Amino acid sequence: MEPDRDNPEDQAGEAEHQARVAEQVAALAHELFDMAREGNASTLAAYLDSGAPVDLTNEAGDTLVMLAAYHGNTSTVRSLIARGADVNRANDKGQTPLAGAVFKGSDDIVQILVNAGADPTAGTPSALDAARMFGKDEYLSLFGA
């Protein structure tokens, strides 16, 4: 039976239902971000293959690939890229996954992101800027600088 949209009790029940669903979605999103941080590539991939958005962002604008890259989770980064993650999407501070990987000194992830088309000049500071700041000459060469 359809709820009566003019009935205040049905409206309240619908609002409560929507609030519960919103809480469940937020909890799942939090779990997905934890999977990216912790490198739980296979479980995260299963959620993405079931329809979770690969470029999901948290309250800071960090994507799953940003979190995986920053935390050094190589297999998770590869898995996200294989599923179409935007390697150039910056967070709310203007930081990109490549700049995060440069900052952390994650050589494998830097290479993977560059091979996937990450732009070393994107973001603020850019990966190029970060490589210069930290004296990472090997990254400067990789970026063609």
Image (tube, rainbow, N blue to C red):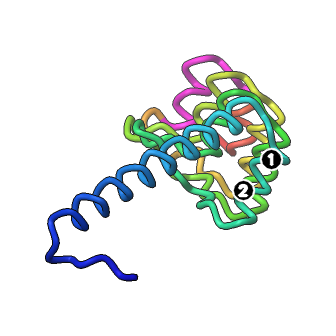
> Is 35 left or right of 9, judged from the image as shown?
right
Q: Position of residue 122 (x, y in %)?
A: 50, 47
Q: Position of residue 80 (x, y in %)?
A: 73, 53
Could you say which is closer to the camera, residue 26 or residue 119? 26
Mark 2 = which residue? 47
Within 10 Å of disc 2 (Cα), the crowding (few <14, some 14-19, many 20+) is: some
Residue 79 lies within the magenta run: no
Tell me, yes or no, if residue 98 can be seen here.
Answer: no
Whether residue 132 appears in magenta in the rendering, the answer is yes
Give the extent of the magenta segment: 126-137
Location of residue 108 with respect to 41 vertically, above or below: above
**Going 85% across and 42% down the picture, which residue do you hit?**
75
Picture layout, residue 109 above or below residue 4? above
Residue, x 23% and y 58% (percent of image)? 12
Q: Quadrant of the N terminus?
A: bottom left
- The amino acid type, in three-letter code, at marker 2 is Tyr
Query: What residue is pinned by disc 1?
Result: 43
Residue 28, image x and y in percent? 58, 45
- Determine the main secondary structure of the stretch shown in magenta: helix
The number of numbered discs placed on residues in the rendered structure image is 2
| Mark 1: secondary structure | helix
Mark 2 secondary-structure assignment? helix
Which residue is at 72% across, 56% downward? 47
Asked if the residue under mark 2 is in contact with the one under mark 1, i.e. CB atoms within 8 Å, the reply is yes
Viewer-closest of 90 and 110: 90
Q: Is residue 69 above or below residue 2?
A: above
Judge from the rendering whether residue 140 lies leftward or rightward of residue 125; answer left or right.
right
